[in-house]
Amino acid sequence: MVTWTKDMLRILKEEYPTKSNAEIAEELGISARAVQWKAYWLGLKKHNSWSHIEWTDEQLNLLRRKFPICSLREVAALLGISKTVVARKAKELGLQKAAKSEARMKIEETIKTYIGMYPFKKIAEMCGISARRVGKIAKELGLTVSKEARNRMTSEAVAKAYELEEFYVSCGLSPEMERKLGSDKSRLNMEYRLREDGYFVTHGCDVVYFSPRLKRHPVRERHAEEMGMVFVEYPEDCLATEDNEGAQAPENLINSSIMVITGKITEVCPIREGNKNGHDWKVQDCVLEIPGGEKPQICVFNVFGDNIGKFNIQVGEQLSVDIQMSANKGKDGRWFGNNRAMEVTRV
């Protein structure tokens, strides 16, 4: 408990408006908090620092010349003071900003044109400014985004996220994302897990195929069936054997995307690795020579993720490969095929 003497109170009243609490506390030999509380009870106030700045003629002339055409930040940097002090002094002198620059007018026109059509982030990229700045300018112009437009843009963003999620699944990557996308996420996760276990899954199709030699997972299958999936075993005539030469024919494709090919590995390419949107991926291309006819046929297939180490494919091996075929359309309109190995059996 501090006992305040008359001398201490006199010093406090004289020095509080101009000195810091720490300086007064050091002089009086007490804590800064005690100084603060005593000043509060006495009703003492600090002087406004901006009103006590002594402006020179040179500073005032610079302010009058630069304020109409420069930003507050630029003027404050030139004068070596804060933006708040500059703004208050300019208001005191009655200074006004000059007419809007051509660049500012273009930015406003862009915002007026695209607000409600694109998110602020997209408009900011068009204008070369921040999304927060776009919001401030829109508020100054009295522009608002309707609830319908906001919902539409949100739906488009979610649709793009779903598309990216499906891309991860098609590449054998984990579909888990930081953002919650809705109930379909559990379905995508299940499809990914089933593919990892060796099942043949086509996104959007409820039929899941499995090979007779596959080690099945009853618990996972039960959960998948609760989501509406149906498990079907390969037809026997679609499995490649020495006595079944027609297994490679197009009419024997499983679910129009899966086939089993038997041949000899002639080349194993180096592993390619990368990272896309925070997800690590790796893929290895293998060349399979299919005997038959005057000239052997060549097939290239991909092995993704952990299956590279699991399959451990070597040159010269005779393999029966379960291949899932898919295709993707590029931005230029061209189609790209992809053959992914789902299961490998040495014969």
Image: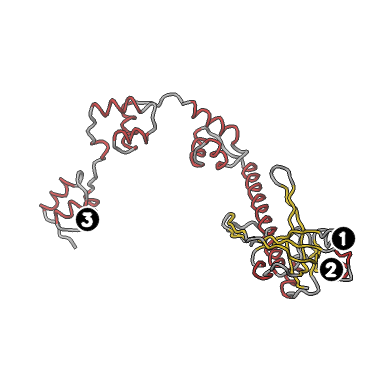
Q: Which residue is mark 2?
A: 240
Mark-to-mark CA distance, 1 and 3: 96 Å
Kindly give the residue lying farthest to the front in the view shown.
294
Image coords of residue 90 (percent x, y): 33, 29
Image quadrant in which you'd find residue 254: bottom right
Circle nearer the N terminus (2, 3): 3
Task: Tell me the crowding category of disc 3: few under 14, some 14 to 19, or many 20 or more residues within 10 angstroms, Cα based.
Answer: some
Q: In the picture provided, is 188 more to the left or to the right than 88? A: right
CB atoms of marks 1 and 3 within 8 Å: no
Image coords of residue 221 (percent x, y): 75, 71
Callout 3, which amino acid? Ala
Instruction: Identify the residue at image location x=78%, y=75%.
Output: 213
Which of the labelled discs sits on residue 203, or is there none?
Answer: none
Q: In the picture provided, is 161 more to the left or to the right than 137? A: right
Mark-to-mark CA distance, 2 and 1: 17 Å
Q: Which residue is mark 3?
A: 32
Task: Please say whether residue 231 is visible from this viewpoint.
Answer: yes
Callout 1, which amino acid? Gly
Circle nearer the N terminus (1, 3): 3
Please name whichever residue, 73 or 310, is drawn nearer the observer in this view of the structure.
310
Can you say whether 130 is above or below 227 in the image?
A: above
Please name whichever residue, 322 or 46, is drawn nearer the observer in this view of the structure.
322
Image coords of residue 151 (percent x, y): 64, 46
Circle nearer the N terminus (2, 1): 2
- Tag 1 secondary structure: loop
- Tag 3 secondary structure: helix
Mark-to-mark CA distance, 2 and 3: 87 Å
In front: label 2 or label 1: 1
